Image (cartoon, helix red, strand yellow):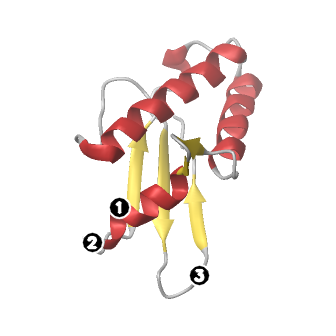
Amino acid sequence: MNGRLKSAAHNFAHWLSSRNNDWYGYWALGIILASTRGGNIANVEFSLTRGVRRQNGGVLGVLEEDYRRFFAAQLEKQSVPPESASDAAAVFSFDRSRTAMRVHVVNSR
């Protein structure tokens, strides 16, 4: 089970950080970065499990729901019950002093 959960997390992380992370024709990471500029926000976190919402409404709220569905599909592909990932999140950290971006993708307990 643990290996399949890690595989699902790896597949999700790989897709999330790739150019294929397209959302309605736009690069999702660019949308997330753009949403942080106005409020000078350094981190954006999306819950990937049921129950907890970290984004309330707006574009990020819809994106969180889409990420949650995609993560659930990855779990299903690996035959992992959703309750096995009791707390999973995608956390994006932006460092504006550099051009680099770090993505901490899945933390599952």
* Residue 71 coordinates in the image, percent (x, y): 56, 29
Q: Quadrant of residue 21?
A: top right
Disc 1 on helix, strand or loop? Answer: helix
Q: Is residue 103 visible?
A: yes
Residue 7 in the image: above or below residue 56: above
Query: Residue flagged by tag 2: what amino acid is it?
Result: Gly
In this rendering, would 2 be left or right of 57?
Answer: right
User: Do tag 3 and tag 1 residues touch (Cβ < 8 Å)?
Assistant: no
The CA distance from mark 2 to mark 1 is 7 Å
Query: Residue flagged by tag 1: what amino acid is it?
Result: Ser
Kindly give the residue lying farthest to the bottom in the view shown.
Answer: 97
Question: What number is the disc on residue 38?
Answer: 2
Query: Residue flagged by tag 3: what amino acid is it?
Result: Thr
Residue 83 in the image: above or below residue 48: above
Which residue is the site of mark 3? 99
Residue 56 in the image: above or below residue 74: below
In this rendering, would 35 be left or right of 29?
Answer: left
The CA distance from mark 2 to mark 3 is 18 Å
Of the two numbered discs 3 and 1 on the same chain, state the one appearing first in sequence.
1
Local crowd size for mark 1, using a 10 Å CA cut-off: few (<14), some (14–19), many (≥20): some
Disc 2 on helix, strand or loop? Answer: loop
Kindly give the residue lying farthest to the front in the view shown.
Answer: 25
The CA distance from mark 3 to mark 1 is 17 Å
User: Do tag 2 and tag 1 residues touch (Cβ < 8 Å)?
Assistant: yes
* Residue 36 coordinates in the image, percent (x, y): 35, 66
Residue at image x 30%, y 75%? Answer: 40
Question: What number is the disc on residue 35?
Answer: 1
Residue at image x 34%, y 72%? Answer: 37
Local crowd size for mark 3, using a 10 Å CA cut-off: few (<14), some (14–19), many (≥20): few
* Residue 7 coordinates in the image, percent (x, y): 75, 31
